[in-house]
Image (cartoon, grey):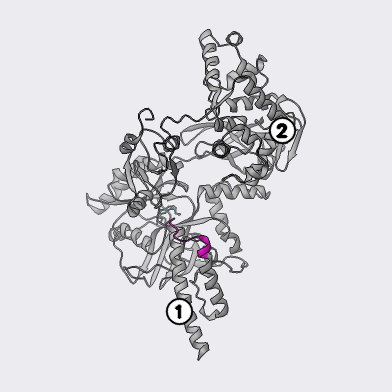
Amino acid sequence: MAGTSGQAAARRRAEDLRDAIRHHDHLYHVLDQPEISDAEYDKLYRELKGLEEKFPELVTPDSPTQRVGAEPRPGFSEVEHVAPMLSLDSGDDEEDARRFDTRVRSALGDGDVEYVAEPKLDGLSLELVYEDGSLTRAATRGDGRVGEDVTPNARTIGSLPLRLRDTDRGTPTLLALRGEAVMLIDEFERLNARLTQDDKPVFANPRNAAAGSMRQIDPSVTAARPLVFYAYEVMSVEGLTLVTQAEVLDALRDWGFRVSGETKTGLRIDEALELHHVLERRRDELAYEIDGIVIKLDDLATRERLGATAHHPRWAFAYKFEPRREISDILDIVVQVGRTGKLTPVAMLRPVDVGGVTVSRASLHNREEIERKDVRVGDKVRIQRAGDVIPQVLERIDEHGKKRRPRFRMPETCPACSAPVVSHGPLDFCTNGLACRAQLKARIQHFASRQALDIQGLGERTVEQLLEAKLVSSVADLLTLREEDLVTLEGFADLSARNLVEAIRTSVEVTLDRFLYALGIPEVGTQTARDLAGHFGSLDALLAAEREELEAVPGIGPKVAEAVSDFLESRGTRQTIEELRRRGVKLVEPEAPAAADFAGLTFVFTGGLESMSRGDAQDLVRSLGGRTSSSVSAKTDYVVAGVDPGSKYEKAKQLGVTVLSEDEFLKMLPPGAR
Ligand code: IVH
């Protein structure tokens, strides 16, 4: 009958479409290597969706269309894990890690032990169960024996396969595995920016964001959160045999999971410890947060022999990085005024060592954040330091029964100049513009900073002295400072005065991008300044641009375009620019002696470099006319692999992209650029 054969054809077509969509999902979400456009993908997806609507009996639970659309449920049900989800024995001392190795070797009576070392991902641990290749359950860790069933939420994660890919190893009849749902750091920052815009509370770190997103009653909320799943452990497998952890990781990759590219196999203990040091150094370059490495015995049968305590297996050890979170007390809360007049409350802390750096102050961001966290002078708080950024107060630690001081109130007048303060949403601003000393000071410091005019010898203390002595009352005044004025300042001798004047004189020849950054336009960092300079080519062209033209610049959204045009249109800005030009600022073409050297070439850096930071290497490539990218594709010309290169190295090899050592890269540089 026509109906039946129509249905049979539909079934075949649906199967083909599912295979194709799964293939493209894998390329996009796991390998970062899409082969078709979003539009082409949407077309496949819509066709499948249409068929499934017409023939609902064709819908399978592992169909790509079943990632979204589950209804919110009243709560999470509890499920027992296939095998207990143990935690890991851990320590942040090299001695601890060596003791682990000694214990393992003495228990085995074997001098030769091979380890695998993996990054310890800082997200939410999940158990996934696949029956005959299809995902049937996802659960949180809970108490280790029983967790919460989060299957509908887990289904929305694009990098988590709903069906295991077919491989030569075959499909296990049962597979229970463990991995981590994480939020990539740049996605986390984007999410927080969005939450701030919507006046919603932000997440303190990517881990909380991942956990909070996973534990949503409504899966459509989870679907809108950019989570990524990394697999790292097989808890139970039936229907095939796996012998080593190295093989487990390969199998997981083959079945379609992401496995961290920083993972290393076949290691002696010393090599595993070395990975700890390498990753601790490179921590801020990774796309996700890690808080250490996990050292695991490679051979699975030997693992069985070692067994586990009630809490943790004896065959693995988490060698953690030094914590970047610590507890301290708030001694005082002061309010700082930034160059845009924004008031920032800052907690003055009892100094504590946080991962090797002494921290004595931490940002409390704004009025609303203080209210939300309810922190007051005298409170105990948890603080966090991440990368180069200013430490933050994460949360207040409740001390039961302790009498607390009154709530903190933002001042109604500017703490620096006493002008009235106005509120815009969660933020407060001084209304006095550059007549406010604090704003002027911050503006001058920014103007002189390394990425702006880079005036050597003009630090915070000197700026303060200049303001105090009324030698400057605008950024332009810097340009007319004379040696005889400076020598009157405390600590200035003839030589230092001459050096500063000379430094200012040479700094006024500046490229347009640096000049734009130096102006301190709200929302404009170094990258946006470069985009603007690159697009308009001259200051006059930029000053003449309409808002629509600004919005058309690649990389610039409506919000930034508005901030730029408001700033550039203001009379004060025009006067400042006029004044700066009159007193000697000269916009010069970027220095490009060899700018054509790398023109048309795209470089990707992976691993740590010995002779310079990765950021400096990227700057160097750009200064020579080349492009840099964070991901390897067929368009990449060179991958520069430093110490412990990551997955990009593998990908370069796969794609046949030329891989350079650091030395080879240095040799490509023109003389003078090295
Ligand atoms: S293995 C029984 N490997 O660290 C061993 N755990 O307490 C199972 N984690 O809850 C864990 N990265 O969430 C393992 N590469 C990795 C990991 C990892 C992160 C987490 C996991 C666990 C916690 C340790």
Secondary structure mostly seen in magenta is loop
Question: Closest to the observer: 330 or 423?
Answer: 423
Helix, strand or loop status at disc 1: helix
Q: Position of residue 126 (x, y in %)?
A: 47, 60
Residue at (37% x, 46% y) in the render: 637
Provide the secondary structure element on which disc 2 rests. loop
Amino acid identity at mark 2: Ser
Residue 570 - label = 2
> Which residue shows up at 61% across the image and 63% down it?
218
In the displayed structure, 556 sits above or below 22; it is: above
Q: Quadrant of residue 269?
A: top left
Q: Front-most of 123 and 562?
A: 562
Residue 250 visible? The answer is yes
Q: Position of residue 177 (x, y in %)?
A: 41, 63
Verify whether residue 37 appears in magenta. yes
Q: Nearer the viewer, residue 550 or 131?
A: 550
Task: Pick the quarter of the image with the C terminus.
Answer: top left
Q: Amino acid at mark 1?
A: Arg
Instruction: Please give the range of residues in magenta.
Output: 31-41
Q: Is residue 39 magenta?
A: yes
Label 1 sits on residue: 12
In what quadrant does ligand 1 lie?
bottom left
